[in-house]
C-alpha cells in the first residue's frame, strides 16, 4: 500500500482532456447500469458547523474502486484553514487489499467536479457558446470555467457574488487567465447575455429564477449537494426544455429536485440522467432557443474514476 500526498497528486493530475475522458467514462458506465453505487453516507455536526460525506462506487470491469471521505468545516477560514478536506482510498476489487491512499485534501474532488460541469456543457450547451455567467466566486466557480474551455470556446465571464470583495478577487484571477470579465450587482444582470450559467454557491434559498434565463442558455447547478442547500427556483425547472442530473436519487434527496416533488411536476417534465444521455447519444436541444438544466450533486463513480486515473499517473511516473 502506498500513500500519496496532495503535492504529488497535483503534479500529475489537472484539468485536462485525459481527466475529462476518464470522468466521462464513469458517467457512461453509470448510465449503462454497469456501476454499483450505494447511497451517500452523510453526517452533519451542527455544533461545529461541519459535515462529512462518504462516497464510493465500483465500475464493472475495473480492477479498483475508491472510497472517498470528504469533510467540510465551514468555520475554518476564520482560523486560517481551508473549509474542505479529505482523502480517497483505492482497493483491489478482486482481493479487497488497500492499494493506495490518496491524501489529496479535496483536490481530486475539485478536479472531478470541474470535469462533470464540462461534460454537462459538452452535451447540453450550444456548440457556439462563448459567454458564461458565474454565480459564486470560490474555487469551484473558477475551476468550472477553466474546465469549460476543454469543450467550448469560452472567453467572456460575467460574475455575481454575495460579497463584492469576493467578486473583485475572482475577476482578477480570471483576467490573469485570459478571460474578459465583468462584475455585476445582480443575478439578472450577470445572466442577461449568457450562453451558459454556472451556479457554484452554498445558497440555502433559490437565487436563480426563470426570468433570469435568456433563450438558449444552459444551466449547470452544482452547489446543492445536501438537503439544506438550494440554488434554483422551481420556475427554472418548469421553464427548462430538458432537465438532466448526475444521479436522480441524489438530486431528489440532496439536489434541486428535493423540493420539486412529483406532485408539482406536470407533463412533459422528464428527469434524465447525464450518463444515459451520453450513452444513448440523445440530442436534447430541438431549437436554438431551448433551455437546458443539469443538476450535479457529485457521484461515487466520479470519485472512482478520478482516483483510478490519479493512481495510474502516479504509478507511471
Image: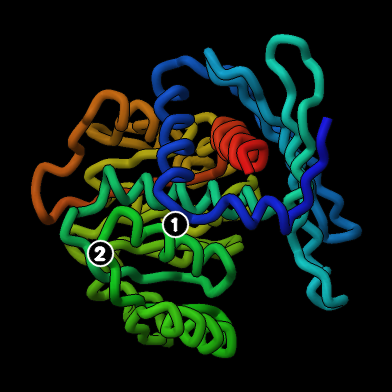
Local secondary structure at mark 1: loop
Local secondary structure at mark 2: loop
Q: Earlier in the sequence, mark 2 or mark 1?
A: 2
Kindly indicate the quadrant of the structure image that contains residue 68: top right
Q: Position of residue 233 (x, y in %)?
A: 42, 57
Q: Vertical placement of 293 versus 84: above or below?
A: above
Q: Position of residue 240 (x, y in %)?
A: 27, 48
Q: Vertical placement of 170 versus 287: above or below?
A: below
Does any portion of residue 45 appear in the rendered image?
Answer: yes
Residue at 70% over, 10% down: 94
Q: Which quadrant of the figure contains the N terminus?
A: top right
Residue at 18% over, 54% down: 127
Task: Please identify the residue farthest to the top as the structure is shown.
Answer: 94
> Which residue position is annotated with label 2?
153
Task: Please identify the residue farthest to the front as the structure is shown.
Answer: 317
Q: Position of residue 264 (x, y in %)?
A: 39, 39
Kindly indicate the quadrant of the structure image that contains residue 20: top left
Front residue of this view, candidates 203 and 33: 33
Instruction: Using a 10 Å C-alpha cutoff, classify the residue at mark 2 as few (fewer than 14 neighbours), some (14 to 19) or many (20 or more).
Output: few
Kindly indicate the quadrant of the structure image that contains residue 11: bottom right
> Which residue position is annotated with label 1?
232
Q: Is residue 212 left or right of residue 261?
A: left
Q: Is residue 307 left or right of residue 282?
A: right
Front residue of this view, candidates 254 and 180: 180
Front residue of this view, candidates 152 and 274: 152
Q: Vertical placement of 15 versus 53: above or below?
A: below
Q: Is residue 68 left or right of residue 73?
A: left
Residue at 35% over, 32% down: 272
Does any portion of residue 253 appear in the rendered image?
Answer: no
CA gap, disc 2 to disc 1?
A: 26 Å
Amino acid at each position: 500500500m502506498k500513500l500519496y500526498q496532495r503535492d504529488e497528486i497535483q503534479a500529475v493530475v489537472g484539468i485536462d482532456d485525459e481527466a475529462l475522458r476518464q470522468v466521462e467514462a464513469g458517467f457512461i458506465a453509470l448510465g449503462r447500469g454497469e456501476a454499483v453505487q450505494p447511497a451517500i453516507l452523510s453526517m452533519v455536526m451542527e455544533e461545529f458547523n461541519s459535515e462529512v460525506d462518504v462516497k464510493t462506487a465500483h465500475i464493472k470491469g475495473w480492477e479498483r474502486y475508491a472510497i472517498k471521505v470528504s469533510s467540510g468545516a465551514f468555520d475554518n477560514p476564520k482560523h486560517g484553514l481551508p473549509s474542505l478536506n479529505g482523502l480517497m482510498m483505492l482497493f483491489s476489487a478482486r482481493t479487497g487489499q488497500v492499494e493506495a491512499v490518496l491524501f489529496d485534501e479535496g483536490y481530486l474532488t475539485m478536479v472531478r467536479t470541474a470535469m462533470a460541469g464540462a461534460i454537462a456543457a459538452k452535451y447540453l450547451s450550444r456548440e457556439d457558446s462563448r459567454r458564461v455567467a458565474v454565480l459564486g466566486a470560490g474555487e469551484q466557480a473558477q475551476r468550472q470555467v477553466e474546465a469549460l474551455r476543454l469543450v467550448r470556446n469560452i472567453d467572456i465571464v460575467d460574475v455575481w457574488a454575495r460579497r463584492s470583495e469576493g467578486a473583485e478577487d475572482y475577476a482578477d484571477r480570471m483576467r490573469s487567465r485570459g478571460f474578459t470579465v465583468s462584475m455585476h450587482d445582480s443575478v439578472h444582470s450577470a445572466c442577461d447575455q449568457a450562453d451558459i450559467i454556472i451556479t457554484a454557491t452554498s445558497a440555502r434559498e433559490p437565487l436563480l429564477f426563470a426570468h433570469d434565463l435568456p433563450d438558449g442558455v444552459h444551466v449547470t447547478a452544482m452547489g446543492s449537494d445536501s438537503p439544506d442547500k438550494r440554488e434554483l427556483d422551481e420556475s427554472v425547472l418548469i421553464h427548462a426544455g430538458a432537465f438532466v442530473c448526475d444521479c436522480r436519487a441524489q438530486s431528489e434527496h440532496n439536489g434541486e429536485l428535493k423540493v420539486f416533488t412529483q406532485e408539482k411536476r406536470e407533463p412533459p417534465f422528464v428527469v434524465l440522467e447525464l450518463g444515459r444521455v451520453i450513452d444513448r447519444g440523445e440530442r436534447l436541444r430541438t431549437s436554438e432557443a431551448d433551455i437546458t438544466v443539469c443538476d450535479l450533486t457529485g457521484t461515487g463513480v466520479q470519485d472512482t474514476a478520478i482516483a483510478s486515473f490519479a493512481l495510474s499517473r502516479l504509478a507511471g511516473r
